[in-house]
Image (spheres, helix red, strand yellow):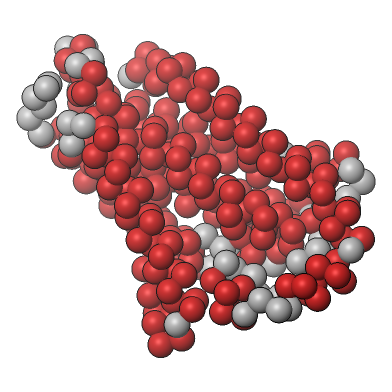
Amino acid sequence: MKAIFLRTIKDRRTMLLIYCIGTIVFLWMYVGLFPSFADKREQFNQMMEYYPKEFMDAFGIQDTGSIFSTIENFLAMEQFNFIWPILVIALTVSIGGASIAGEIEAGTIETLLELPISRIKIFLAKYLAGLAIIAFFTAVSVFAAIPLAAAYNIDYQASHYLTTFIVAMLFAWSIMSIAFFFSVIFNSKGKAYFIPVGILIVMYVLKIIASLKGNLKDLQYFSFFYYFDANKSLIENTIDNWSYIVFGGVIIVLTIVAAIWFSKRDIAVS
């Protein structure tokens, strides 16, 4: 089990490094730009007042006047409501989707199944390796903002980043669990990638529609993007209780079902 865990991390280390560098580059860019935006925030605020309120709500912007008041407000809008979800979705889906379906597609699953350990342990080794990877990425992508802000002499609230890490980790973990679930169902990693991404696109569209149409507001409750609220965690330092319930429920249920399914399914290498 340990060997599979370490091999999985080793196989993904280059990808993980690229994603970590990418998220740090984006953070560095936004933190570096923040002082300039803050100095001219009155002009930017006036410009943004011309945007329709529904448009601003759709992208999680509740108070245009405070966007440039703190680094947390700025990063919540620029990094964690836009760039970060894209990066973490790409990373987690690729990890989860390739975990089992990728082994089947490559014809290497037979080698794993011949090892003197149970299928459950194989699944857990793969799953825990994926969890370790996304935890590392999430920590880097969130906490890297602190030394960057300090380097530019920008005031920051350290506790807010810990809160953001928690909800971000739950968000990423949930997506990985979905990807793992489909990875144990299909023999093709293409399908294991496509379906989770399709589900997340639908969720994102539902959140946008709910923001634009008041009579369809309840649709937001069917979207992960509603429960991953960077404004609440990074600006207000809070996490909605429903975020724990929804993400926790998805993680627990899909992980258990995926583990049982993998332990019992017939695997035909194509």
Q: Residue at x 68, y 41 (%)?
A: 26
Residue displayed at 56% across by 63% down: 229
Kindly indicate the quadrant of the structure image that contains residue 193. top left
In the displayed structure, 65 sits above or below 198; it is below
Instruction: Where is residue 175? Give x, y as percent.
Output: 39, 47
- 161 in relation to 107, above or below: below
* Residue visible at 43% across and 74% down in the picture: 209
Can the viewer see residue 260?
Answer: yes
- Quarter holding the C terminus is top left
x 41%, y 65%: residue: 205
* Relative to 178, 132 lies left or right: right
Is 19 left or right of 267, judged from the image as shown? right
Q: Is residue 56 positioned above or below 178 on the image?
A: below
The quadrant of the picture occupied by the N terminus is: top left
Q: Position of residue 19 (x, y in %)?
A: 56, 32
Q: Is residue 116 visible?
A: no
